[in-house]
């Protein structure tokens, strides 16, 4: 989590340079905070715009609806992450099927859902927060995605990795958690066997960070531990009852 | 083949052989053979041993011919038993073959039929025609080696359809000298000749030992690791006397599963059994192109390390760092030390499954806080750090079932497992079933009805709490429950990802089901 990806340094330098003249005027008037560059400026993420997207052969879930980060307490021990997972942040937090631009209010602060596609196997939440101008340290992220399965798939497992800890739900049932101060690793935490329904399946995660890098990756594995790639991301609304 | 691993560590494995259970007295046992789910071996005289599981043995029914040091092989649907006898003074001898469709006297197919004399020595020639050993090679050619001290070990080719000489006019080939109990095996591009050197039949004074050489052809030349030809007395030591077990001889190979092999033999004298000659079974390993005697799991406290991931199996509870943690900033991407476990209930919420843990670098309540000695951040405490007391940390563990996960080894209590043989629970070739408990507790590893892992507060002896711990040909171990409720096939402890273990079919081509048992 202390690792700043190489992109960050030139970006930060650029932002400082751009902010230079304003800083000169700061003695006279408060400097206006530059607008955040936005998700499409991220090297790893882009705003999701298509109606659906098929998974790549490696099976990683690439389209997510991510809520802007909310404050956490900076602890990532097993018990701290359990406490975070059991805390109520907003109504229906384990059932909500968000649309991009919708908001939730927590402790008088408003947070917006964003639909993003990742260009990589992982979803870089540091990029997400940074390019939205949000806090990256001591925060928690909620993520939701929906995958449509062409048939029922028994014996599947959700395989996740995250920085730092995380807890995961599939179709409303908690299936796996990974705890502690850790870095994202492919197939780090594996759920017990579960059955993917034919049609939409909702995957939900809570990522808890202390500071530094924060990201996650997730995919489904079949009974032989091979990635399940025959799934298609669809809008969460598709999973509405 | 996955690289050989010397991770079968001493605490777990010594002494070298785990005495089989039941009636195991035998001399010159044949290669083990399976028939209708039972294991059989035939020895000198009228001795026959049979076992349902390869661990507990009992006396079997004497075959239609008895004699010296038989060997047995299944060809098609028939078992062919080769039995030697001296016909007059040594080295005048002959080897006779009999065959049957079943080895079970209760079977209607149990009927020994004579096959005639296969080879003989006239008492003058430079060979004593006893101690047959058989190999059906990958090309489908059947080979018989024989001989005992009076001169050479010889080889002839047999007809795999009949078990008789393929061409009696072809002269036997000399392949070794000054040994007996020879047998060929084949591995990769090599034929290996295993033969017994030393003296037999003198109880605790016997100095039998098993030697090996290898050749590209079944007819030799068989050279040892130093290039000495077995025709001139060469032979790499495969197995000698150890501990209270004296005089190993009469090697026989049995493949239990792909990647899982054992060898049978006898000790001339088991001093713990009054010096009796006894059957023994051990894993057969392969290292650098040579067979190596493996070790049956015996018991002890270990860490169960996945060959695939390098992480170890642990209880899914929040670990308590050991005393002496630095508590300062970590490195390698880690943030500052966590403020320490609160001492409250551990992780592993009800309903949460497959929880995977990671190291928390900060000091916890059992950790004693930061300890920067006078030597600075990396100087340690200046005195040994006491092992974690499981009785203390286990107070925070849930009372009921606790799931398992995998994590980096940190010498914490939830990462240490004790393997202990379970009396009268049966076993498998070479070893008994074990219970696997968290060290210092009775909390036992168990298989669940849906083919996953859990731990239960107390060991009950149920089949899903009994574990087969078998060394594989690369030296790592396969760990399998005796049974999994509702499962249709045997399952093995398997690493899936870095942070989770489950039960899956054993795949010899994968490292998922391979574990290092490292003594603690």
Image (spheres, coloured by chain):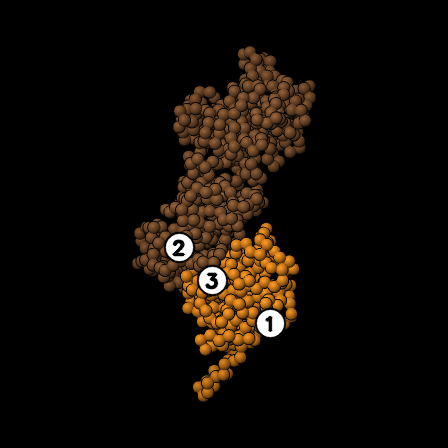
Does dot 2 land on a helix, a strand or a loop? loop
Image position, residue B67 (x, y; %):
54, 18
Image position, residue B142 (x, y; %):
64, 27
Report whether residue B180 is seen.
Answer: no
> Which residue lies under the disc numbered 3?
A165
Q: Nearer the viewer, mark 2 or mark 3?
A: 2
Q: Residue at x 43, y 60 (%)?
A: A78
> Which residue lies under the disc numbered 1?
A47
Residue under disc 1 on the same chain as residue under disc 3: yes
Which quarter of the picture shows residue B154?
A: top right
Q: Chain of mark 2?
A: B
- Contact between marks 2 and 1 (CB within 8 A): the answer is no
Q: Residue at x 54, y 57 (%)?
A: A159
- Visual hue assigned to chain B: brown
- Of A214 and B421, the residue lying toward us: B421
Q: Residue at x 42, y 64 (%)?
A: A83
B257 vs B110: above or below = below
Instruction: Give the chain coloured orange.
Output: A
Q: Disc 1 to disc 3, how far (Cα)?
A: 25 Å
- Contact between marks 2 and 3 (CB within 8 A): the answer is no
Q: Chain of mark 3?
A: A
Q: Disc 2 to disc 3, how far (Cα)?
A: 21 Å
**Viewport quadrant of the C terminus of chain B:** top left
Q: Chain of mark 1?
A: A
Q: Is residue B504 left or right of residue B420?
A: right
């Amino acid at each position: 989590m202390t690792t700043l990806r190489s992109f960050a340094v030139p970006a930060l330098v650029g932002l400082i340079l751009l902010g230079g003249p304003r800083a000169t005027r700061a003695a006279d008037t408060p400097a206006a905070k530059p607008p955040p560059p936005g998700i499409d400026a991220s090297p790893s993420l882009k705003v999701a715009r298509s109606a659906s997207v098929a998974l790549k052969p490696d099976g990683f879930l690439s389209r997510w609806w991510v809520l802007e980060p909310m404050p956490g307490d900076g602890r990532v021990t097993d018990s701290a992450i359990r406490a975070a997972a059991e805390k109520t942040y907003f109504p229906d937090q384990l059932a909500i099927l968000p649309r991009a631009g919708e908001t939730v209010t927590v402790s008088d602060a408003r947070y917006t859902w964003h639909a993003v596609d990742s260009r990589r196997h992982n979803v870089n939440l540091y990029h997400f927060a940074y390019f939205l101008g949000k806090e990256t340290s001591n925060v928690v992220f909620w993520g939701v995605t929906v995958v449509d399965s062409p048939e029922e798939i028994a014996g599947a497992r959700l395989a996740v990795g995250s920085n730092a800890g995380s807890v995961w739900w599939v179709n409303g049932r908690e299936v796996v958690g990974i705890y502690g101060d850790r870095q994202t690793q492919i197939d780090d935490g594996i759920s017990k066997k579960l059955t993917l329904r034919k049609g939409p399946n909702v995957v939900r995660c809570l990522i808890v960070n202390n500071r530094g890098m924060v990201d996650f990756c997730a995919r489904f594995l079949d009974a032989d531990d091979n990635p399940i790639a025959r799934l298609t991301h669809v809008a969460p609304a598709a999973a509405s009852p | 083949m996955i690289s050989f691993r010397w991770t079968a560590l001493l605490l777990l494995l010594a002494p070298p052989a785990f005495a089989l259970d039941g009636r195991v007295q035998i001399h010159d046992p044949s290669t083990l053979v399976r028939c209708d789910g039972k294991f059989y071996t035939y020895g000198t005289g009228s001795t026959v041993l049979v076992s349902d599981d390869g661990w507990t043995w009992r006396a079997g029914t004497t075959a239609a011919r008895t004699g010296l040091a038989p060997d047995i092989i299944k060809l098609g649907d028939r078992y062919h038993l080769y039995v030697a006898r001296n016909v007059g003074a040594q080295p005048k001898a002959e080897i006779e073959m009999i065959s049957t469709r079943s080895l079970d006297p209760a079977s209607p197919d149990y009927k020994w039929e004579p096959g005639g004399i296969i080879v003989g020595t006239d008492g003058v020639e430079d060979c004593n025609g006893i101690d047959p050993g058989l190999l059906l090679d990958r090309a489908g050619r059947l080979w018989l080696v024989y001989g005992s001290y009076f001169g050479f070990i010889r080889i002839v080719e047999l007809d795999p359809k009949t078990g008789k000489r393929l061409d009696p006019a072809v002269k036997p080939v000399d392949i070794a000298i000054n040994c007996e109990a020879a047998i060929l095996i084949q591995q990769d591009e090599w034929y290996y000749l295993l033969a017994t050197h030393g003296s037999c039949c003198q109880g605790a004074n016997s100095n039998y030992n098993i030697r090996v050489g290898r050749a590209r052809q079944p007819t030799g030349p068989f050279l040892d690791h130093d290039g000495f030809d077995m025709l001139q007395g060469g032979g790499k030591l495969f197995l000698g006397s150890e501990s209270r077990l004296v005089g190993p001889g009469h090697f026989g190979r049995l493949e239990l599963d792909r990647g899982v092999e054992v060898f049978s033999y006898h000790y001339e004298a088991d001093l713990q059994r009054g010096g009796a000659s006894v059957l023994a079974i051990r894993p057969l390993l392969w290292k650098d192109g040579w067979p190596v005697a493996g070790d049956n799991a015996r018991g002890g406290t270990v860490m169960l390390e996945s060959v695939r991931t390098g992480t170890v199996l642990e209880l899914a509870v929040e670990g308590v760092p050991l005393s002496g943690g630095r508590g300062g900033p970590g490195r390698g991407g880690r943030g500052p030390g966590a403020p320490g476990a609160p001492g409250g209930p551990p992780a592993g919420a009800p309903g949460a499954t497959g929880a995977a843990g990671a190291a928390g670098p900060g000091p916890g309540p059992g950790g004693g806080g930061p300890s920067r000695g006078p030597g600075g951040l990396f100087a340690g405490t200046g005195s040994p750090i006491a092992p974690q007391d499981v009785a203390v940390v286990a107070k925070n563990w849930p009372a009921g079932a606790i799931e398992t996960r995998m994590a980096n080894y940190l010498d914490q209590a939830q990462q240490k497992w004790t393997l202990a043989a379970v009396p009268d629970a049966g076993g498998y070739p070479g070893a008994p079933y074990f219970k696997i408990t968290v060290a210092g507790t009775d909390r036992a590893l168990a298989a669940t009805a849906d083919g996953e892992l859990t731990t239960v507060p107390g060991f009950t002896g149920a089949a899903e709490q009994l574990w087969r711990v078998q060394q594989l040909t690369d030296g790592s171990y396969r760990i399998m429950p005796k049974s999994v409720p509702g499962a249709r096939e045997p399952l093995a402890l398997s690493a899936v990802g870095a942070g989770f273990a489950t039960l899956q079919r054993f795949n010899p081509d994968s490292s998922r089901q391979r574990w290092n048992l490292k003594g603690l």
